[in-house]
Amino acid sequence: MKILPVFNNFIRQKVSIQNNQYDYSEQRLSLFKNPISDTFEKNISFNGSPESVNPSRAPLEKLYKHNLTCLCCGRVMIEPKKIAELEKSGVLKLNSAEAVKYLEKYRNNMHSVEQQVFDILKEQSKLYPYLNFQQILNIIKPEYEKPLIKTQFGIFKMIEKACDNIDPKLKQNVANLIQEEKSLILSGNNHFRRKRFVRKFEQIFEGTSNTALKEHLIRLANKLPTSYEDKNAFVVKYSSYPSEAIGIRLLSYSICTIEHVLPKNRDGENHIFNYIPECMRCNSFRQDRKMTQQLEEHPEMFANAQILMDRLIDFANKGKLSKLYIVRIKQRIEEESEGLLDLDISKLDIPEKAKNKIPGLNTDTDNSNSRKTKSKEDGSADKKTKKQLKRERLKERHKRKYFAQKENKKIR
């Protein structure tokens, strides 16, 4: 899940993307538990054997320009090269009327909050066409700061109320921290940072035995608005950023990146068989968590992952991507999602004779046939069981009658 930077200003913004920070290459495990044998691979018209397949991300990066959709959110991603060119051109430093023209074509690629902020900037550019993005955000900041502060202070109240029955010392520490953060918010200098507050808040409860209460309080703290979830927080935070950085930020979370299906710090390999395209937001938000958690948070991923896979299969059938990659990445995703995400790769152009020899390669026909066979077997098993039960009941009835008659004879 490592993301390579494609523009300098975004790095200078110090955006924290803690993804696969460490390389555990010396401790790597085998990528697949059930690798396909060499015999099967030779029987299939793949673009080379595993050894000949390029392990780098280059083949996938070449597909960026084809408007790939995100594995998770399904959004059409932006080619990193486009944003780099936009930054190099300097158009985002121009007045808002000009900058909006260049960003307009990327609106549908933006995530929801970024779309909302772009629409605000677009409307304001009609009133202030000669001002840049930073100047506009500073003008409208008071309007968006009021509802933001109201939300933040409301969450602080919820936290304080939840701390009513905790240890007095811990309660006082929480009250002091909240008062400190309130002062930063009211100062109007954009010094409040949610991540810093949550980190300090967690430190207060380190070693606390009541884990349920601790988790509840941390969950409340994490409800504080962020710039990627709330337009008010975005406007207030980025009102102090240069115009170009604001424009880049509107696009940055939508760029196409390479996701490690099995994260690096869980022994995921730097190999194409462990790479899948995903937007920067979904990639960075997942960090090193299991894919099962990502699916819980984004159930739309079940449909979106198949859409992306169908596109990749189309490229493989046209010779732009290794067919072996499709089979391997399907297996990798299924393993990492604990079987929840079983992608259909039946559209992959593979000879019929080879299909049955490839583990994990299921077609709709195969699935339907297997279901029919299974249902027949289950049906016959049920019938057998019913007959056996009937016989056993009859035997039991005859036994009861026999012993009853025997007892009657003894009594007489």
Image (cartoon, rainbow, N blue to C red):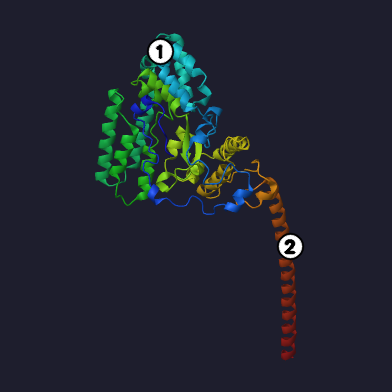
Q: Nearer the viewer, residue 353 or 283?
A: 353
Up/down of 89 relative to 257, above or below? above
> Residue 49 at x, y = what percent?
56, 46
> How packed is label 1: few (under 14 Cα within 10 Å), some, or many (20 or more)?
some
Q: Residue at x 32, y 52 (%)?
A: 209
Q: Nearer the viewer, residue 347 or 195?
A: 347
**Residue 23 is drawn in which quadrant?**
top left
Q: Earlier in the sequence, mark 2 or mark 1?
A: 1
Task: Answer yes or no: is residue 196 visible.
Answer: yes
- Assign the C terminus to one quadrant of the image: bottom right
Q: Nearer the viewer, residue 133 or 67?
A: 67
Please say whether residue 124 is visible from this viewpoint: no
Label annotation for residue 117: none
- Position of 119 with respect to 148 (left or right) is right
- Disc number for residue 94: 1
Left or right placement of residue 102 versus residue 357 in this view: left
For marks 2 and 1, give the CA distance: 76 Å
Q: The residue tagged with tag 1: helix, strand or loop? A: loop
The answer to which of 280 and 138 lies nearer the viewer is 280
> Which residue is painted at 39% across and 29% down in the image?
151
Residue 104, how many percent across, how many down?
50, 18
- Count of picture labels: 2
Question: For the residue marked with disc 2, what is the amino acid?
Answer: Ser
**Of labels 2 and 1, the one closer to you:** 1
How packed is label 2: few (under 14 Cα within 10 Å), some, or many (20 or more)? few
Which residue, given by chain and number where applicable, does mark 2 sit on? 380
Image position, residue 233 (x, y; %) = 39, 26
Q: Amino acid at mark 1?
A: Leu
Residue 378 position (above or below residue 256): below
Residue at x 45%, y 23% (from the top left corner): 83
Q: Secondary structure at mark 2?
A: helix
Q: Is residue 312 left or right of residue 287?
A: right
